[in-house]
Image (cartoon, rainbow, N blue to C red):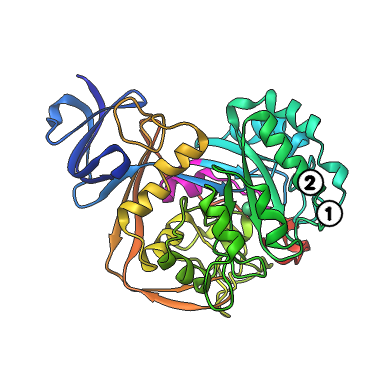
Amino acid sequence: MPFDLLLKGGEVIDPNAGYSGRLDIGITRNRITAVEPNIPPESAFQVIDVSGHYVAPGFIDLHTHYLPGTYWGLEPDAIGARTGVTTWVDAGSAGAMGLADFRDSAAALMQARSFAFVNISYIGLIGPNYEMTNPEYSNVELLKRAISQNRDIVAGVKIRAGRSGGGVDLTPFKRARRAADELGLRLMMHISGAPPELEEVLPFLKSGDVLTHAYNGRTMRLIEDNGKIREVAKRAVESGVLLDVGHGAGSFSFVSAEALIPQGYAPYTISSDLHWMALYGHRVQDSQVILSRGDAPDDDAGSVLVDIVGGREPAFDLLNCLTKMLHLGMSLPQIVEAVTAHPATVLGVEGEIGTLKPGAYADIAVFDVVAEGIDLYDVHGEHRHADRQFKHALTVLNGRVWEQQPLPKPPAWLRFVDEEAS
Ligand SMILES: [Zn+2]
């Protein structure tokens, strides 16, 4: 009896591994051990018929927030189980001071796989904003010590460029560059509202670094008013900087994406920037209706008002971001690569996750693309109508079917702060 679990008859889509078409997937313990056209059902203890569904490697969301006790940090497992996101990458919630806690109270306790970009500011994103207001928080030696003790879960160094990060002082940028170089790590840079200006900060990025919120519509957007890519952004991409979506609650503009993608600047990775506001909307209030894209959150999800009445729509979840990218003209294989093989490359774990090749961990997303119309909004209220959308079917994590669980309640203190969302 070679297989513990067999996913039978699905439409496999893993361009990077060279798989497409109807294939069965055999799983032994927590690894994929066969991808073949016709594996006999009697060769497995458990057989799941996934015919009619797409089957891809479990999704890797390269930009999320889930460090407990921080402003943005949600609990990821319930969301992962209903969206196929089997690997979560926290983008800078922890700085040097919070990294040990990230390991103990986030990574070690969650079911999904977990990595972190570590904030150059040692306080990380414990509050919503201004982590770099004091440049002395950007302490290279402290960061290096913290990372060297947690290297197995570290994806790179994170820095937020913009008013929300708190600064026009470029000292933290110099230090983040130095730390990344000395540790041999990638830098992930967030861009939003100037200052600082794009021209001041993008030159800190090198080949292989990640520019997140690349399709934002704020003053640090990558396009000129006429829609052409800005010269400084063009140079960054030509030097090998990778574009990431990082939708969030404030960082995705149809105008930017519709200008950039046809010019050849499609995202290398599609991430949700999921945090409390990106999941539930800008306004978290006491007693109001619960609205969400697709499945409404469970009744016990808390009292939440999603501010889509005025059209400003957050990410909701990674699948909703994928629906937007499909509407914007990315092909299904391109989209799958941008949430599997590409982020696995950024994490340096190719062959382990983000692939269905035998030997990889058995993390698998089973989903549909249904011909069902959907009204989409960006964070500025721009509306588009898409005629197809992604829907979740089943998630396998580490060789086991990931059971659905109730969505977590947002923490009470979120509503104390009415900040511009990141
Ligand atoms: Zn973020």
Residue 108 visible in the current orientation:
no
Residue 320 position by quadrant: bottom left
Magenta residue check for 161: no
Q: Secondary structure at mark 1?
A: loop
Residue displayed at 24% across by 24% down: 3
**Which residue is nearer to you in this view: 34 or 300?**
34
Q: Which residue is mark 1?
A: 169
Q: Is residue 140 left or right of residue 248?
A: right
Q: Is residue 323 left or right of residue 24?
A: right
Tell me: residue 338, above or below residue 41. Answer: below
Residue 414 in which image quadrant: bottom right
User: Which residue range is magenta in the image?
Assistant: 72-87
Circle 1 packing at 10 Å, graded few (<14), some (14-19), many (20+), is: some
**Nearer-the-camera pick, 356 or 304:** 356
User: Which structural element holds mark 2?
Assistant: helix
Judged left or right of residue 179, residue 171 is right
- Measured as percent of width and height from the top left, residue 59 is found at 42, 45
For the point 65% across and 48% down, the residue is: 73
Q: Are marks 2 and 1 in contact (CB under 8 Å)?
A: yes
Amino acid type of the residue tagged 1 in the rendering: Asp
Give the position of the C terminus as an image quadrant. Answer: bottom right
Q: Is residue 355 visible?
A: yes
Q: Is residue 33 above or below residue 267?
A: above
Q: Residue furthest top?
A: 1
Q: Which residue is mark 2?
A: 172
Relative side of 389 to 199, left or right: left
Q: Nearer the viewer, residue 261 or 51?
A: 261
- Residue at point 58% right, 69% down? 306
Q: Is residue 86 magenta?
A: yes
Amino acid on which the number 2 mark rests in the picture: Pro
At which x and y percent is residue 376? 45, 72
